[in-house]
């Protein structure tokens, strides 16, 4: 897969995350005031989830593969918040809640799959033979004197190297 296709996949998933989030917001009944039974950690989790999804959306929209990581964590937080929402009387359970759980789980599964997919390598353009760099001579070309005691290498016999004896 080429880099262009990878960017298109990231951008497509950014659009899917946005569509899932907007769909959940449209399905959800109007929320009541913050119920007194809602724990403070839920507020922190909701804010963290929204920030992670925003970062993921922006990164994936820019074609950055690392955006799948905050998407996975943000979607996981979205699943948790959706699952426990009726527990503190924020909303009542209904068909919308089942749809919200399904959409948030789909966002989580897609983000985890995108995150765990191996990175796609791009094929480097081939370099014409005329532009290629010639290979270096082997390192052992002038070191044959060291191979056998008393042996003289070809460069030494031609006078390029002097015998140190």
Image (cartoon, rainbow, N blue to C red):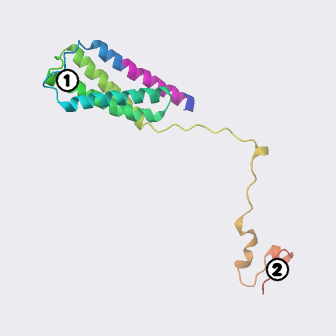
Is 1 drawn above or below residue 160 in the view shown? above
Percent position (x, y) of residue 22? 35, 16
Give the class, few, some or many, for how many residues have Cα within 10 Å of label 2's Cα (few <14, many ≥20). Answer: few
Is 144 drawn above or below residue 50 in the view shown? below
Q: Residue at x 35, y 32 (%)?
A: 72
State the residue position of label 1: 85
Image quarter for residue 54? top left
Q: Residue at x 55, y 38 (%)?
A: 121
Percent position (x, y) of residue 152? 79, 80
Counting every numbered tag in the picture gives 2
Image quarter for residue 36? top left
Q: Secondary structure at mark 1?
A: helix
Give the class, few, some or many, for how many residues have Cα within 10 Å of label 1's Cα (few <14, many ≥20). Answer: some
Q: Is residue 88 left or right of residue 142?
A: left
Q: Is residue 155 left or right of residue 74?
A: right
Q: Quadrant of the N terminus?
A: top right
Question: Looking at this rendering, what residue extends furthest in the left direction?
Answer: 37
Q: Is residue 126 magenta?
A: no
State the residue position of label 2: 162
Q: Is residue 86 left or right of residue 103?
A: left
Percent position (x, y) of residue 105? 30, 26
Is 55 drawn above or below residue 33 in the view shown? below
Dot 1 or dot 2, earlier in sequence = 1
Is 72 drawn above or below residue 14 in the view shown? below
Q: Which label was assigned to residue 24?
A: none
Spatial separation of the CA atoms under disc 1 and disc 2: 88 Å
The magenta span reads 5-19
Any part of residue 109 in sight: no
| Closer to us: 148 or 60 | 60
């Amino acid at each position: 897969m080429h880099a262009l296709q990878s960017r298109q996949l990231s951008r497509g998933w950014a659009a899917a995350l946005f569509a899932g989030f907007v769909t959940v917001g449209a399905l959800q009944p109007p929320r009541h005031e913050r119920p007194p039974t809602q724990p403070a950690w839920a507020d922190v989790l909701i804010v963290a989830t929204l920030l992670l999804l925003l970062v993921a959306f922006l990164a994936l929209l820019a074609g950055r593969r690392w955006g799948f990581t905050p998407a996975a964590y943000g979607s996981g937080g979205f699943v948790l918040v959706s699952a426990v929402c009726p527990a503190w009387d924020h909303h009542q359970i209904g068909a919308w809640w089942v749809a919200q759980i399904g959409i948030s789980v789909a966002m989580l599964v897609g983000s985890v799959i995108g995150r765990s997919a191996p990175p796609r390598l791009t094929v480097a353009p081939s370099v014409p033979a005329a532009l290629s760099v010639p290979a270096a001579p082997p390192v052992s070309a002038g070191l044959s004197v060291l191979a056998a005691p008393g042996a003289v290498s070809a460069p030494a016999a031609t006078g390029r190297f002097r015998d140190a004896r």
